[in-house]
Image (tube, grey):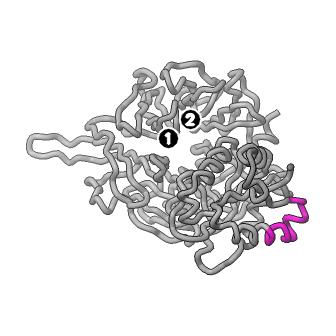
Amino acid sequence: MAGHVFISYCRRDKAYVNLLAAYLNDHEELRRFALRVETDRSTRTGALWAEAIDNLLDTCAAVIVIMTPDAAQSEWVDKELKRARELGKPVLPILLRGDQILNRVKDIQYLNLLDGESYPGPAFIADLVEKCGLGPRRISGRSGVLRGPVGTAVWGLAVADVSGRPVLVTSNSAGAVDMWDLYTNTALGTLHKRTDYGVPAIACAIVNGRPVVVTGGDDVLMLDLESRSVVGDVRSNRLARFFDAEVTCLDAVELHSQPMLLTCERSSNPGGLHHPPSEVSRVRLWDLTTMKLHKSLFARSSWPAPTAIACGRVAGRSIAVLSMQFGRAQVWDLERFTRLGRLGTWRGPAASSSDVALGEREGRSVIVLAGQQAEVWNALTRTREFSLEGHSPGVQAVGCSVVRGEPVAVTASGDHVVRVWNLRTHGRVASLTGHKSPILSLECSTVGQRPTVITGDAGGEMRIWDLESHVP
């Protein structure tokens, strides 16, 4: 059946699920788009049960999962979610009873019905309709311009889902962490403001079912995006401030179904009687749920601090790619805490690397490393495949996406131009112009189910580009 939503649930929750399905099917918004909610209640018996369930999942537009203690123990709920995630179906979790978030949806913001509400509200309905690919948000691509304070460099960009709406979180050289609505392209306000220096990096994650952003700098603050409040200082539990340590870059990653944070720190060691002053670089992995240190990957004196981090999964294991200076990078296994290898060779300051991204090409993972040009490396063998040349002077920011089934890389530089490349053919497919200042940051994401890239420049301007509209 086309145009339907599948509900995954435990048999003991059947009574509520029947009421929920009736409520949703009678909702004006779902009826307007001829969207039906289906459960598996008519297929709970018979030899073809598993086949019928697979058919409902294969053809559904989205999946709602009812989270209860019974569902957490249900083998069928786990199988249904596993298949839904493998198929790339949008999943909308609802917490009905208990406090256990199912492992397969820990990275997704959920609706909490523990506070007395019986059924989802308008925000959930709107999110459901959008994730099913219906309504005007999918039809029209998102693009536009956001403007921060003039002359304030945009250093960090991250996209999160807050109450069913995509928001952009930014950090800048003036020390502000701001929120923007990506549907209306309007400012939502300042989450946090420092007065002494800027915030060099940010990363978004889902912690205990709530969207958060974590900031870099001399402290690592976790900010709740819904309440717009400070949750805490990630490093304070360990007294981890080391002299004037500064987190230069960070990235969120899920490890063993837990939200984690990888940070790169740079600090000055004042030395002592027999030791001269030196620079110390540290890379640490933090548990965002407990806000405690999980593991220190390395600490080196006189090493250049990494300039960017990209975390992801390669060949079934979680890895981190640390972009270093002088056109080099390191690849680390985050599960075994071992270094897998290096990328690049020593080339001198002229080839300084500034950003890194993970993507896919022809069924294998690749690393896109920024430098004098963008270089594409095989993530598994750590061998160089080809270069993406055309920017001058050098590449400042990189990202990866998929446009109409084609793997693409997006690069930006001080030449004010954003370039889009087909990673399969190695060719440039689009040049996006409009920035009047050097581009410093770039974030690839999905907004309204469309591939989108957001860029920030040294003058305080951010541009939102719909890649399907701008790529031929």
Q: Nearer the viewer, residue 418 or 393?
A: 418
Examine the residues drawn in magenta and state their main secondary structure: helix
Q: Residue furthest left?
A: 273
Q: Report x, y in % for residue 250.
A: 45, 48
Point 44% across, 50% down: residue: 261
Point 28% across, 40% down: residue: 299
Q: Residue furthest front?
A: 46
Tell me, for residue 149, which label it has, or none. none
Quarter of the figure that contains the C terminus:
top right
Local secondary structure at mark 2: strand
Q: Report x, y in % for residue 372.
A: 54, 27
What is the three-letter code of the residue carrying label 1? Cys
Does residue 6 appear in the picture of this structure? yes
Point 65% across, 67% down: residue: 13
Q: Nearer the viewer, residue 364 or 8?
A: 8
Give the class, few, some or many, for how many residues have Cα within 10 Å of label 2's Cα (few <14, many ≥20).
many
What range of the chain is rendered magenta? 22-35
Whether residue 29 appears in magenta in the rendering, the answer is yes
The residue labelled by disc 1 is: 311
Q: Is residue 2 above or below residue 303?
A: below
The residue labelled by disc 2 is: 358
Q: In which quadrant of the rendered view does residue 194 lie? A: bottom left
| Count of numbered circles in the view | 2
The tag earlier along the polypeptide, 1 or 2, is 1
Does residue 152 appear in the picture of this structure? no
Whether residue 9 appears in magenta in the rendering, the answer is no
Q: In which quadrant of the rendered view does residue 160 lie? A: bottom right
Q: Nearer the viewer, residue 139 or 434?
A: 139
Q: Relative to residue 443, is residue 73 drawn left or right?
A: left
Q: CA distance from mark 1 to mark 2?
A: 7 Å
Local secondary structure at mark 1: strand
